[in-house]
Amino acid sequence: MPQTFLVFDFGTNEEAAQQARHRLEAWKQALHLGDRLKFKFERQAPEPPAEPPAEAEAEPAKGKGKSKSKKKEAESAAAAEPAGDRLRVLVRLEFSDHEKLSYQRWVDRIPAEAPFPSAEKQVVHRGQEGFEKTATLFDELP
């Protein structure tokens, strides 16, 4: 059975990833694709900085009230910054052998439709290097 994974890396563009999700759900429902089209999201948190900010280390402890308020201000400023999670959408196409034409049309169509052209894409067919790794990742995602 032909099986292919399409991996789209949207970077930190949450809006484009959500548009992609809506587009895939609409196709799946409207065209009765069922298990032929499955998709999952992978969200990778950015790596934390290796060193704590220099301000927190250089801050002398003059009084309890002042140091606590400065510490709370630094924490709230860090929380206000966008997380910057890296978003990837993994799409699995799985058609039976007699649906080769439909399968090929979807492999060609999905990357061409908006919002997918804005993302970095990778197409992994069965038998190619990295297929097993991608299949394992897809199965492990919720």
Image: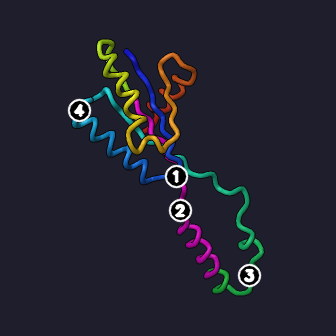
Binning the other alpha carbons within 10 Å of mark 3 as few (below 14), some (14 to 19) or many (20 upward) gives few
Q: Is residue 68 magenta?
A: no
Task: Compare marks 3 and 4 and give the one earlier in the sequence.
Answer: 4
> Which residue is under mark 3?
61
Looking at the image, residue 74 lies above or below residue 7: below
Q: What is the number of the mark on residue 82?
A: 2
Residue kind at label 4, given as amino acid type: Leu
Q: Amino acid at mark 1?
A: Thr
Q: Which residue is mark 4?
A: 31
Three-letter code for the amino acid on which mark 2 is drawn: Pro
x and y, in percent, of residue 81 in the image: 55, 66
Relative image position of residue 127 (x, y in whole percent):
51, 16
Q: CA distance from mark 3 to mark 4?
A: 65 Å
Q: Along the polypeptide, which appears first: circle 1 or circle 2?
A: 1
Q: Quadrant of residue 34?
A: top left
When asked about the image quadrant of residue 36, the answer is: top left
The reply to whether callout 3 and callout 4 are in contact (CB within 8 Å) is: no
Q: Earlier in the sequence, mark 3 or mark 1?
A: 1
Q: Is residue 39 left or right of residue 47?
A: left
